[in-house]
Image (cartoon, rainbow, N blue to C red):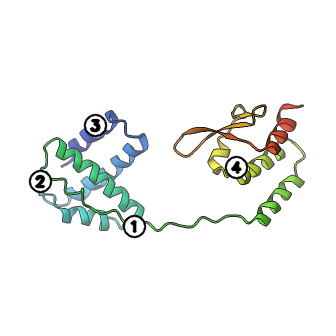
Amino acid sequence: MLEIKIEHFLDYCKVSNFATRSIQSLRVRLNEFNRFINKTPFDSIQGISYKHLKKFVTQYRNPSIHVKKARIWSLRQFFHFLKLNGWIKINIASDFPYPKIEKTIPHFLTIEEYNSLLSFFYGRASDASSFRNLVMIMMLGLLGLRLSSVISLNIEDVDIETGLLQIIEKGGKQRPLIMPKILCLIFGSVFWVS
């Protein structure tokens, strides 16, 4: 019933510079919604009520809280688009509340645990790859980088002369970071001097 309107909406999202991952998420959730709606007899899109949205968000295929949140966001965006184009009079999804997601407290290493980890890798640092591992552990602990940021580093991202490191953060954003002198020394002695 909604296939054509969903495709129009996804084209609108591309023109509106939605992120690729957002468009993929919208496609998945709205196709789920379309399958859900097709199981209920409707003669037009105006027959969809808040009650139907609530049933889809909370009960269809026993969703997790994160899926519920993604469904609500998708429905809000989609019904806003439908209203803009005059296919519906009221955005019935706009007042749908987002579920509360409990925040988890991150677990950190103690100073003793981190020092033990450093000692372990330092004791085994005998060639370039083992020094690389030591440097990675140091970057994680000293700079507080995400594992994905450390893994995505290339040698060109390190400037030991200025002590700058170009990292790619969550979301693909790039930013410079000042490295501690000890990291610059290890990089210089292992990776540039042969």
* Contact, mark 4 vs mark 1 (Cβ under 8 Å): no
Q: CA distance from mark 1 to mark 2?
A: 29 Å
Where disc 3 sits, the SS reads helix
Three-letter residue code for mark 4: Leu
Closest to the observer, 164 or 158? 164
Q: Secondary structure at mark 4?
A: loop
187, 4: nearer the viewer:
187
Mark before the other along the chain sequence, 3 or 1: 3
What's the CA distance linking mark 4 and mark 3?
A: 41 Å
Q: Residue at x 35, y 50 (%)?
A: 28
Distance Cα–Cα, label 4 vs label 1: 31 Å
Q: Residues within 10 Å of mark 4 (few under 14, many from 20)?
A: few
Q: Looking at the image, tell me whether mark 2 or mark 3 is earlier in sequence order.
A: 3
Image spot of residue 135 (x, y percent): 78, 46
Please indicate whether residue 57 sits to the left or right of residue 22 in the image.
left
Q: Residue at x 13, y 45 (%)?
A: 87
Question: Which residue is under mark 4?
Answer: 143
Task: Tell me if label 1 and label 2 are in contact, CB under 8 Å.
Answer: no
Q: For marks 3 and 1, give the CA distance.
A: 29 Å
Q: Which mark is residue 100?
A: 1
* Mark nearer the viewer, 4 or 1: 4
Counting from the top left corner in percent of width and height, residue 144 is at 67, 52
